[in-house]
């Protein structure tokens, strides 16, 4: 039996995510408001799902169909596990919590579980206890982030997981490339892209959340998908870094500069506030 979340529980991202949009939600919501009564919601790079969960919390989705997808099967497995049996995931996380230590972390990191709930709990556990909450895989698709230094990591936030499960029940969750959204989205739908960012410097690059990587060629294919959705009459919103390439690819759309704190840089003196770009086709 699925337990109800606590009285004050609201759905929020259950994964820590590099570049997560928690701090830019106000800016994103301003733009979503301009889309008015959009028909359906699509998020092809779901990541931590900050915008999705906030729209759900504010009851902005209502009965609208939502489609969450990503090319990373391990990430999507975590979402599916929570949707299908959140109590099973919670039980497994409690086991991880009870045994957490350095040796246990690396033993779990090396595992390749077959059962959906085991895969979901493993990814959440690793994400909550690894260095900086990174979600990174090598070319073989293996999670390769070292353990972080946390005194008391929040490995199992049961109330939040239950709140997330509740809003995911009617959501389509699929492993698919971002290009597939062209065949899914219709006129009047809202599509939000939050891809791996174009690096602002050689030391700031982070495109390895998935074994396939995400370089300039992928960024150009994404811009082509953006234009195809625009031609279909969909509302399209995208976040990325404010770089020359992004300006080149989206210069004929509305491009807004915003400030955000970022920590992905091999040099500590280059972490901090950076310029990010919010691109839309419906705020001319």
Image (cartoon, rainbow, N blue to C red):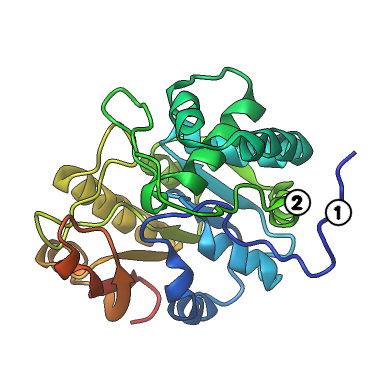
**How far across and how far down the image is residue 161, in percent?**
69, 51
Q: Residue at x 35, y 71 (%)?
A: 281
Q: Which quarter of the figure has residue 84?
A: top right
Left or right: residue 147 versus residue 89 is: left
Q: Is residue 100 above or below residue 40?
A: above
Task: Please say if the residues under marks 1 and 2 sit with CB atoms less than 8 Å apart.
Answer: yes
**How far across and how far down the image is residue 265, in percent?**
20, 58
Left or right: residue 47 versus residue 54 is: left
Q: Is residue 134 above or below residue 243?
A: above
Q: Can see residue 189? A: no
146 and 251: which is toward the camera: 146
Q: Is residue 62 above or below residue 78?
A: below
What whole-number distance in Å separates the C-alpha atoms at marks 1 and 2?
7 Å
**How far across and how far down the image is residue 168, in percent?**
69, 49
Q: Can see residue 256? A: yes
152 and 144: which is toward the camera: 152
Quadrant in which the C terminus is drawn: bottom left
* Residue topped by disc 1: 4
Q: Secondary structure at mark 1?
A: loop
Disc marking residue 239: none
* Residue topped by disc 2: 162
Left or right: residue 189 versus residue 116 is: left
187 and 105: which is toward the camera: 105
Q: Residue at x 68, y 59 (%)?
A: 64
Q: Residue at x 36, y 71 (%)?
A: 280
Q: Residue at x 70, y 39 (%)?
A: 94
Q: Residue furthest right?
A: 1
Q: Secondary structure at mark 2?
A: helix
**How far across and how far down the image is residue 170, in percent?**
72, 47
Total numbered labels placed on residues in the image: 2
Give the class, few, some or many, for how many residues have Cα within 10 Å of label 1's Cα (few <14, many ≥20): few
Which comes before the other along the chain, label 1 or label 2?
1
């Amino acid at each position: 039996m699925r337990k109800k979340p606590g009285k004050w529980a609201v759905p929020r991202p259950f994964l820590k995510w590099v570049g997560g949009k928690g701090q830019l939600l106000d800016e994103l919501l301003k733009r979503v408001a301009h889309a008015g009564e959009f028909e359906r919601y699509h998020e092809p790079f779901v990541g931590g799902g900050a915008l999705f969960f906030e729209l759900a919390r504010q009851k902005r989705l209502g009965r609208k169909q939502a489609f969450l997808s990503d090319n990373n099967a391990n990430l999507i497995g975590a979402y599916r596990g929570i949707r299908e049996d959140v109590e099973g995931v919670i039980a497994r996380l409690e086991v991880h919590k009870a045994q957490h230590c350095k040796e246990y972390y690396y033993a779990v990191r090396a595992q390749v579980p077959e059962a959906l709930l085991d895969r979901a709990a493993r990814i959440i556990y690793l994400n909550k206890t690894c260095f900086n909450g990174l979600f990174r895989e090598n070319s073989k698709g293996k999670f390769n982030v070292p353990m972080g230094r946390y005194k008391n990591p929040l490995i199992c936030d049961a109330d939040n997981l239950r709140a997330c499960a509740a809003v995911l029940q009617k959501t389509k969750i699929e492993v698919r490339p971002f290009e597939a959204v062209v065949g899914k989205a219709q006129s009047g739908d809202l599509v939000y892209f939050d891809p791996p960012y174009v690096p602002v410097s050689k030391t700031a690059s982070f495109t390895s959340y998935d074994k396939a990587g995400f370089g300039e060629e992928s960024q150009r294919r994404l811009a082509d998908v953006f234009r195809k959705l625009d031609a279909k009459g969909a509302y399209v919103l995208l976040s990325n870094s404010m770089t020359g390439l992004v300006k080149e690819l989206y210069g004929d759309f509305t491009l807004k500069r915003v400030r955000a704190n970022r920590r992905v840089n091999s040099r500590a003196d280059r972490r901090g506030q950076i310029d990010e770009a919010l691109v839309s086709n419906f705020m001319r």
